[in-house]
Amino acid sequence: MHTKKGVIYTLDNDTTIYFLGEGYPVDFEKNEKNSLRFIMQKGFKYSYKNDLDKAKFLEILDSFYLQKAQELLPKKIKEHAENMGLHPTKISFKKTKSQWGSCSKANALSINTGVMKLPWHLIEYIIIHELAHIKHKNHQKQFWTLVAQYVPNAQEVRREMKTYA
């Protein structure tokens, strides 16, 4: 059913949610409350009152990814920024459809909350990639040389990222 990791096509007992590269099954349960609880060992448990509402489920899941990005990523970004000597003017997190991250002309980083689905090594690649844009605003040779200093297998990592949505 799932051709790309992290994509939810339907809500049923085969639904898997990804967090930090690990797949967690979702347990759907009709109940008096609308809630989503994340239990690392077992997976996600989603309770709903009336009909199973995919939009509401995805809204709650998006909130979970935003919370985790805000909680876990600033420290990683700071570590890599210190290591690279490249410091963003601002860091923000939001859900986007087509980009894992971006760096503005003013050196503000924006990271897609969907990165929380990825394994750590891919998240770190995205952070390094965006930090490298502070120095090089394009994808010219100097940019890729800088990225490769911190991610020697960058081409392999980029291929792996294409397996995620």
Image (cartoon, helix red, strand yellow):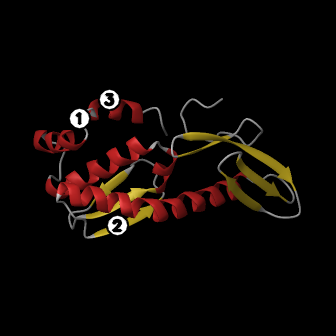
Tag 2–tag 1 contact (CB < 8 Å)? no
* Residue receiving disc 3: 156
Q: Secondary structure at mark 3?
A: helix
- Whole-percent x and y of residue 101? 36, 53
Disc 1 from disc 3: Cα separation: 9 Å
Task: Choose between 70 and 140: the one closer to the eye.
Answer: 70
Query: Is residue 6 at all visible to an observer of this figure?
Result: no
Amino acid beneath label 3: Glu
> In terms of sequence position, does the residue under pointer 3 or pointer 2 come before the other?
2
Q: Secondary structure at mark 1?
A: loop
Please tell me how crowded label 3 is: few (under 14), some (14-19), or many (20+) other residues with Cα within 10 Å.
few
- Whole-percent x and y of residue 22? 56, 40
Q: Is residue 34 left or right of residue 129?
A: right
Query: Is residue 104 at all visible to an observer of this figure?
Result: yes
Disc 3 from disc 2: Cα separation: 27 Å
What numbered label is drawn on residue 91?
Answer: 2
User: Dividing the image into 4 quarters, which one contains the N terminus?
Assistant: top right
Q: Secondary structure at mark 2?
A: strand
Amino acid beneath label 1: Pro
From this view, report whether residue 149 is shown above or below residue 60.
Answer: above
x 57%, y 29%: residue: 3
- Whole-percent x and y of residue 147? 21, 43
